[in-house]
Amino acid sequence: MAATAEKTIQTPVKKVSQKTLKKSFREWFYGNLTCFSQEHMQTFGYMCAMLPVIEELYDTKEEQIEAMETYRVFFNTEPQVGSVVVGMTVGMEEAKANGEPIDSEAINAIRAGLMGPLAGIGDSLVVGTLIPILLGVSLGMSGGGSPLGPIFYMVVWNLIAIFGMRFLFNLGYRLGGRAVEILVGEKANAMREAITMIGTIVIGGVSASWIHVTTALTIMNGKVTILDLQKTLNNIYPGLLTAATVIFCWWLMTKKNLSPVIVMLILVAVAFFGCLVGFFNPGLKY
């Protein structure tokens, strides 16, 4: 009896190429706000980033259209840190195309579950910490009208944004769904709090270096100085008025939800009134 050899036909494993990964990242980096509106936010930018991936993973137009339907759902987060979500969904879409038990609901659950926490992380670390630090350094380099300050900011910020976003995108792609624990777990919370604390200290140092609020209020009795308020404050708490000004601005923006423009107008009004009564004007004494 002749033995019959059975051949097992294996489906080739689908893999997103490096060229497509780079193209997907570029689409997100440059176009995350594509067709931005209050109704859709970053939805269309996300779809643009996923389009080259979908085209490579699925062969027929019907499969591609069905896969792209997943990304029509509303999406909005902080774009720099949010790069990791795009990378994660690329990895999950690759696993789905290879027959793993992942569907569009699972992908959208990951997207919806992470876009809020990552927005908070990104806004606090990037917008609230990194950018003010870079601006503080740039201001220090701009003394006397030097162009080094703005050049420094543009170069350093773009380098950090490009390489940081690329790192997070690739990290998300490699980890897939496992990245959720890393991003929102206990270790991530502790790391975020530590970075936020460091950023707060740095911003406090920048404020102390660049903000100088003093008073000229002096009480005289003839030619005898009864009270020089600034000297008295320096003996008690040097920089007290500066600290009070910074805390006052923080209170207005965080507790009263006032915009920076309104806060600046309030400071102008306070300065104008203070000069009128001689609190800030060294030419008037009481």
Image: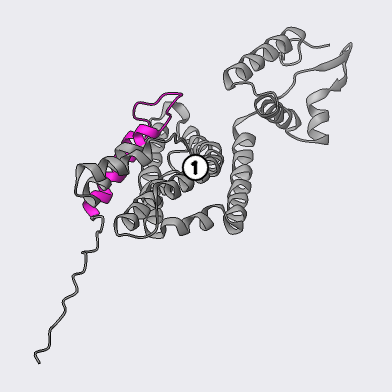
The three-letter amino acid code for the residue at tag 1 is Ala
Residue at the image point whose x is 39% and y is 33% from the top:
43
- Element type where label 1 sits in the image: helix
Q: Position of residue 224 (x, y in %)?
A: 88, 17
Q: Position of residue 36 (x, y in %)?
A: 39, 26
Magenta region, main secondary structure? helix
Residue furthest to the left? 2
Quadrant in the picture for the C terminus? top right
**Residue 190 magenta-highlighted:** no
Identify the image's colour scheme: rainbow, by chain, secondary structure or one colour.
Answer: one colour
Residue furthest to the bottom? 1
Residue at the image point whose x is 39% and y is 38% from the top:
152
Residue 97, relative to residue 220: is it above or below? below
Q: Is residue 29 visible?
A: no
Mark 1 surroundings within 10 Å by alpha-carbon count, few (fewer than 14), some (14 through 19), many (20 or more): some
Q: Position of residue 87 (x, y in %)?
A: 37, 50
Residue at the image point whose x is 71% and y is 32% from the top:
243
Residue 72, relative to residue 213: is it above or below? below
Q: Is residue 215 visible?
A: yes
Choose top left, top right, bottom left or bottom right for residue 249: top right
Residue at the image point whose x is 10% and y is 92% from the top:
1
> Which segment did they paint magenta?
18-45
236 vs 82, left or right, is: right
Residue 255, relative to residue 77: is it above or below? above
Foreground residue, 44 or 162? Answer: 44
User: Which residue is identified by label 1?
Assistant: 112
Total count of labels:
1
Residue 4, relative to residue 256: is it above or below? below
Choose top left, top right, bottom left or bottom right for residue 185: bottom right
Q: Position of residue 180 (x, y in %)?
A: 50, 54
